[in-house]
Amino acid sequence: MTPKDLPQDLVFFERGWLSSNTVLLRGDDPVVIDSGHTSHAKLLASLIQHRLGPQAPTKLINTHLHSDHCGGNAHLLDIWPQLDTWVPQRVLNATNMWDEHRLTFADLGQHCPRFKAQSPLEAGQTLLLNKRVWEIHDGPGHDADSVLLFAPHERILISADALWENGFGVLFDALQNLSGFDQQEKTLDLIESLNPQWVLPGHGGPFNDIKSAITRARGRLAHWRHEPQSHAQHAAHVLIKFHLMVRQSIAVAHLLQWAQEVRLLQRIHQDFHGEDTFDTWFMHRIESLCLKKALRMKQGHVIDV
Ligand SMILES: [Zn+2]
């Protein structure tokens, strides 16, 4: 869905929560921004083909390298091997070396098919994409290396997971050190100063009541800054729910086995809930997600809802 008063050459594919949204910039050199999760990669390719017809995209840009934003890259590169792939400069080498720790897939317990990238995205850079200038800005907080794209003439912001209509993504930076909350605050300040007319977020629909969205985001940030343990618990819930969205249904014993290898879950347990054993704490998380009706249990299996 693309709202009518957004430029017609800009196509917004709003996806479910497992896959990030994708923005397609149409023109002589079509550009794909973010590619969703690997499990929806074929669907994304057909959505792009449907819009472009015989034309092929020439550039693939990733705002950040979480598996729900770049999981479709490998499949798109299979179809269009000439795609020039752009990732944030600080993770360009790690991408080409496929360093799964630096890229955080291993720590978050996520899977992303390997791909290569050629071109760096750096704050301060401007890209001319089909006659529209896009500024690249740093947007740390959710992800230390995330970038935002801003078209100053029409004041359109591609915000990734730094700002959604109702909140923002888990502040992974804040789980490493508390300065992650400050990073997110700076990113919200930056977005406010850019004064966008439209925000195309990484998840959920596009929105133009930016003032209200920033107020809600600041409220959430203040709450989490005050109670980092509730932010950490939310992060654990997001990681578990995400895994279930991928797997759909999984035996409790296998889920526990997966969780024991997810470093970030181990760290959250140690830092915030060390009084219980990991397994006890983890099963409380599952119960809590079942109470919220985000998951359910049936015959020794945890099932996504
Ligand atoms: Zn993300």
Image (cartoon, rainbow, N blue to C red):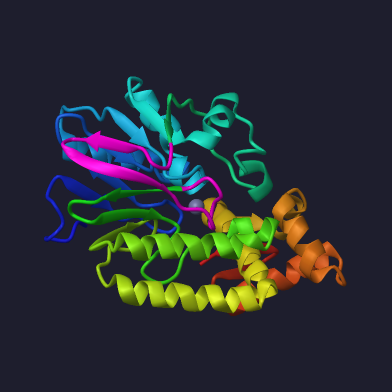
Q: Quadrant of residue 183?
A: bottom right
The image shows residue 149 at horizontal and vertical percentages of 34, 47
Q: Is residue 71 left or right of residue 170?
A: left
Task: Identify which residue is drawn at 31% across, 44% down.
Answer: 135
Magenta segment includes 253: no
Marker count (numbered):
0
Give the residue displayed 16% in from the left and 56% down from the top.
Answer: 6
Foreground pick, 276 / 98: 98
Query: Looking at the image, which is closer to me, 179 or 2?
Result: 179
- Is 242 situated left or right of 202 in this image? right
Where the N terminus falls, by quadrant? bottom left
In the rendered image, is residue 118 in sight? yes
Counting from the top left corner in percent of width and height, residue 5 is at 12, 60
| Residue 29 drawn at (x, y percent) | 20, 29
Residue 142 versus residue 121 in the image, above or below:
below
The x and y percentages for residue 34 are 38, 43
Q: Is residue 97 above or below residue 210?
A: above
- Magenta stretch? 122-146
Give the residue at x 69% y 58%: 177
- Quick check: is 130 in the magenta stretch? yes
Q: In the rendered view, would you say 24 is above or below 54?
A: below
Q: Residue at x 56, y 52 (%)?
A: 247
Q: Residue furthest top?
A: 82
Can the viewer see residue 241?
no
